[in-house]
Image (spheres, rainbow, N blue to C red):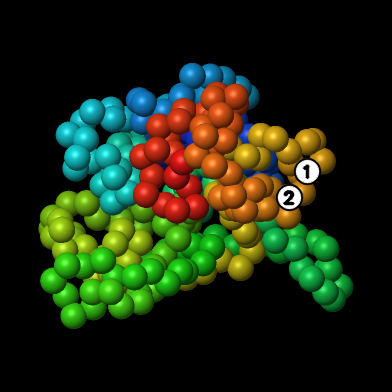
Amino acid sequence: MMKNIAVMFRGHIRTWHFNYPFLFDFYESIAENVDYYFITYDNSNHAGVEKTFKGKNLITFQIYPHDFDTTKWYNSWYGPAVMASLLIPWRKRREKETGKEYDAVFDTRPDVLVKQKQYLFGDKANLNIEPLPPEQNCIYSPGLEIHKNLSKNSARVGKPEIAIRDWFLMMTPEVYDMMAKRYINDYRVYTDGETPGAQIEYIDIAHSLEFHICTIDWLDTRMTRPSVFQLDWKQARTWEDVVYASGLGWVNLTSDEKTQLCLQYGVEVRDYLDSASATCKI
């Protein structure tokens, strides 16, 4: 178990009201102390979110203006990085107040559910795999993906590239601070319009800063969709049912059915209209 961790939630609220009890259980089972930081968009349904942190160490809850130069800052590249930058001063103040350093910083989203993996066989079969803190100069993700390079003027355009799952990351505070600057021109490898894609560029910038990209073998993650609200008590606690509901259980719905689900469970429809992802958008 780690001693002290910071969990930085950023982005659309989406399925937070389904995820949060399980997320609190997870993070508080892997560390003696957990400090939470939260920043979301003003056009997301953030009503009541602060109340879900009753009894928890919520250090700051911030609203990021959707209309802040929307065309530049409200996207998958600038949004997460700028949001991270806005949380850093609060984390530094907390570190100064407590005199404690964080063993790990988790950079994640409100709609990402996490669970600890278990040993499959041997003397420890069915026991949780022990959590490991991040090493220096390393960035940890649940996995890597293959994306098509989107750069317009590059020999790599259209070719398959390794991309990081940037919606859940673990690292030391020092690495978090450096990667939060990735939207600043001095740190970028590409210019706007020439990027191969946010999740590919993230890796290229990490390598330019001599950070290592690693995968985490002791936890699993899933981006949950509004279809999980239809699960009964037992299904909501069964990982396979949550995975199915968030995958085919969502993708196979029509746009109208997805919209009705959002309206029924108080999820802001715009949270999914703004997405270009085929497995996310309405």
Callout 2, which amino acid? Asp
Q: Which residue is mark 2?
A: 241
* Residue nearer the viewer, 13 or 29: 13
Please state, as top left, top right, bottom left or bottom right, where the N terminus lies in the image: bottom right
In the rendered view, tell whether residue 91 sits above or below residue 187: above
Q: Quadrant of residue 198?
A: bottom left
**What amino acid is labelled 1 in the image?**
Gln
How many marks can you see?
A: 2
Residue pointed to by mark 1:
235
Q: Looking at the image, which residue sits at the far right?
A: 123
Q: Residue at x 22, y 51 (%)?
A: 183
Residue 178 placement: quadrant: bottom left
- Residue 60 shows up from this direction: no
Tell me if mark 2 has few (under 14), some (14-19) or many (20+) residues whose alpha carbon lies within 10 angstroms of its own: some
Give how far apart the Cα atoms at labels 1 and 2 are.
Answer: 6 Å
Q: Quadrant of residue 262?
A: top right
Spot occupied by residue 236 in the image (x, y as percentages of width and height): 74, 41
Query: In terms of depth relative to the viewer, which is nearer, 7 or 229?
Result: 229
Q: Nearer the viewer, residue 1 or 231?
A: 231
Residue at 49% of width from left, 62% of height from top? 141
Residue 241 locus on image (x, y percent): 73, 50
The answer to whether mark 1 and mark 2 are in CB contact below 8 A is yes
Q: What percent of the width, then of the height, locates residue 269?
A: 45, 30
Of label 1 and label 2, which has the lower sequence position? 1
Determine which of the numbered discs, if any, sits on residue 271 in the image: none
Q: Secondary structure at mark 1?
A: helix
Local secondary structure at mark 2: helix
- Looking at the picture, how far across and down is residue 145, in whole percent? 45, 69
x 66%, y 53%: residue = 243
